[in-house]
């Protein structure tokens, strides 16, 4: 049975699930809830996603693993995860005006991963996201090795994937997470 501290979260998640059926056609909330109630660690991760403004919702089901897939579905990149460099190396390479944190460390502490480019594009099929903000996405090692990192947004009714130095940060750039339950 789920701890009382997550009862309010489950209510929010169920309400969001029911209001956005286009994101998860054919999925049943009772099955999602049963999986969540069986895994307090995943509930804690979802709670962090919610607390930082991510508005997590179910966006799919992996038939191979039997896992439900949650993405941050807030209209803009989550407020509680903005103004961060891409990773620790990027953060440490800054000489001055360092932000408080970086996307990869924050995601790891939350128990989530950054969206991949494919996942970000899939999210954009469910609605229009990041019209005023941008989100760091997982960056291939070959790009990161050269000092770069990838981010994405939606402008002009088009999803754009861009690059920046991993040490850069902006008030409107954060990250979106993915969690498998």
Image (cartoon, rainbow, N blue to C red):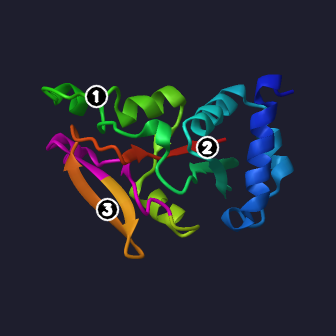
Secondary element under disc 1, as helix, strand or loop, is helix
Numbered mark located on residue 88 in the image: 1
- Which residue in the protein does label 2 denote? 180
42 relative to 130 in the view: left or right = right
- Of pointers 2 and 3, the one earlier in the residue sequence: 3
The residue depicted at 74 percent of the width and 64 percent of the height is 21
- Which residue in the protein does label 3 denote? 161
Quadrant in which the C terminus appears: top right
- Of pointers 2 and 1, the one earlier in the residue sequence: 1
Secondary element under disc 2, as helix, strand or loop, is strand
- Of pointers 1 and 3, the one earlier in the residue sequence: 1
- Name the spot of residue 88 as percent of width and height, x first: 28, 28
Instruction: Look at the picture and state if 156 lies above or below 173.
Output: below
Along the line of sight, which residue is nearer the eye, 82 or 105? 82
Density class for disc 1 (Cα within 10 Å; few <14, some 14-19, many ≥20) is some
Secondary element under disc 3, as helix, strand or loop, is strand
- Between the residue at mark 2 and the residue at mark 3, the CA separation in whole angstroms equals 24 Å
In magenta, the rendered stretch is 129-150
- Name the spot of residue 76 as percent of width and height, x first: 49, 54
């Amino acid at each position: 049975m789920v701890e009382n501290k997550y009862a309010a979260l489950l209510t929010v998640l169920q309400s969001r699930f029911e209001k956005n059926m286009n994101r998860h056609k054919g999925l049943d909330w009772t099955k999602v809830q049963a999986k969540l109630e069986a895994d307090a660690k995943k509930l804690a991760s979802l709670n962090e996603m919610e607390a930082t403004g991510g508005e997590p919702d179910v966006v799919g089901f992996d038939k191979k693993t039997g896992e439900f897939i949650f993405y941050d579905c807030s209209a803009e990149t989550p407020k509680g995860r903005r103004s961060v460099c891409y990773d620790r190396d990027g953060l440490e390479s800054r000489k001055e005006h360092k932000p408080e944190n970086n996307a990869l460390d924050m995601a790891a502490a939350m128990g989530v991963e950054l969206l991949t480019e494919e996942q970000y594009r899939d999210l954009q099929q469910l609605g229009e996201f990041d019209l005023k903000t941008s989100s760091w996405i997982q960056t291939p090692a070959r790009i990161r090795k050269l000092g770069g990192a990838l981010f994405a947004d939606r402008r002009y009714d088009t999803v754009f994937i861009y690059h920046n130095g991993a040490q850069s940060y902006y008030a409107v750039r954060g990250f979106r997470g993915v969690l498998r339950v």
